[in-house]
Image (spheres, helix red, strand yellow):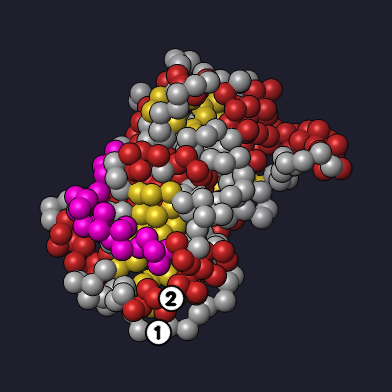
Amino acid sequence: MKTSISRTLVFAGGGTAGHVEPALAVARAWKEKYPQDHCIFMGTPTGLENTLIPVAGFELRNIDKVVMPRRFNLDLVKLPVRLLGAVNSAKKVIKGADLLIGFGGYLSASAYLAAFLTKVPIVVHEANVKVGWANQLGALLTKNLAVARPIAVGRFSRASVTGLPLREEVKKAYFEASSDWHQARDCAKEKLGWNVNHPTLLIIGGSLGSTYINSQIAMALPFLREKGIQILHSVGAKNELPPDSENYRAVPYINDMATAYLAADVVLARSGAVTCAEVGALGRMAVFVPLPIGNGEQARNADYLVALGRAVVVAQRDFSAKWLVDNIEKAFAQSANNAENGLGQDLESEQKIVDLMEKALTGKS
């Protein structure tokens, strides 16, 4: 679809990296194809988008955050009024736009309603295997649906399976490693200062870290060190930084995640959709401990990696220092049995979503 007319597209997906990073990847792909178009991101004042979007060079406009209460209380009674206010704020952002694309999260519900009321075409992308309530709402308002992984039932069972857009540095690392995965993994270990012949464990608890996982690692650390395991631990920027010791390095945040994924024989992490996709692209084996809150979406995100023998999923109630000590060698053995290459299923995700957006603009579902 070629055009010289400048259009405005609004991207809704804020709060966490899991919503923002895929939206950014699609926006970059769209601007590369249609540099004359204007891409606006809708966010909330407290979301991670306030850091990521301006740095990426896109315009950000914030609206009020409306959180869906998980139990009956005063917040649930106030929900309609708050939602109406957020929808009105979203309408001001969307007014005159040619398309809205939402990536889930509380923010997207207001955006979908605002777009529907102003007759702006809507595209919905769902990253998780279990659909969140905002995207369930969006699916009632449009037929232009995309999913990262196939969903068996409901409206999203008919969605386009696009995969999950990857960060540019992850894609770049995949292509660079493809010529020789073994060498790429050894080089990554050396870059991090590790011995290429010793098992390496990467621990990440999401963008903010995980206090629970951190506490279990602290108890398991003496036993892991006895096994000669090299550990890189991202504890989260707001969590206390443990002291480094032999074969153990703790950091607030890992800037070069691509190298960390390549260097790791086993990744221990939450199973957010973005983390699963990046582990799939560059990792070899993972132990996932799903976040035990939300609508349970994290418990299903790694299903396809489990089916391929590239991951095991352990509920947080079952995960402990003892579980890790008892099972980590099994995970390393599985890693050694797995192929060294990563999975390429998400490499063209953003272009597939761009294709769907083009069809939505022309009125073709």
Query: What numbered label is drawn on residue 221?
Result: 2
What percent of the width, then of the height, locates residue 198? 23, 72
- How far apart, in angstroms, are the residues tagged by discs 1 and 2? 10 Å
Q: Secondary structure at mark 2?
A: helix
Decide: few, some or many residues near mark 1? Use Cα within 10 Å; few <14, some 14-19, many ≥20: few
Query: What numbered label is drawn on residue 219?
Result: none
Of 87 and 303, the residue lying toward us: 303
Of 315 and 180, the residue lying toward us: 315
Check the image and report above or below for 142 versus 53.
above
What percent of the width, then of the height, locates residue 42? 60, 43
Residue at 61 percent of width and 20 percent of height:
140
Mark 1 vs mark 2: in front: 2
Q: Quadrant of the C terminus?
A: top left
Residue at 68 percent of width and 29 percent of height:
114
Check the image and report above or below for 343 versus 113.
below
Check the image and report above or below for 294 versus 363.
below
What percent of the width, then of the height, locates residue 154? 53, 20
What percent of the width, then of the height, locates residue 50? 59, 55
Query: What numbered label is drawn on residue 245?
Result: 1
Q: Magenta stretch containing residue 29, yes or no?
A: no
Residue at 26 percent of width and 75 percent of height:
194
Residue bounds of the magenta highlight:
324-347
Contact check, label 1 and label 2, Cβ < 8 Å:
yes
Check the image and report above or below for 313 versus 233.
above
Q: Is residue 280 left or right of residue 233?
A: left
Q: Amino acid at mark 1?
A: Ser
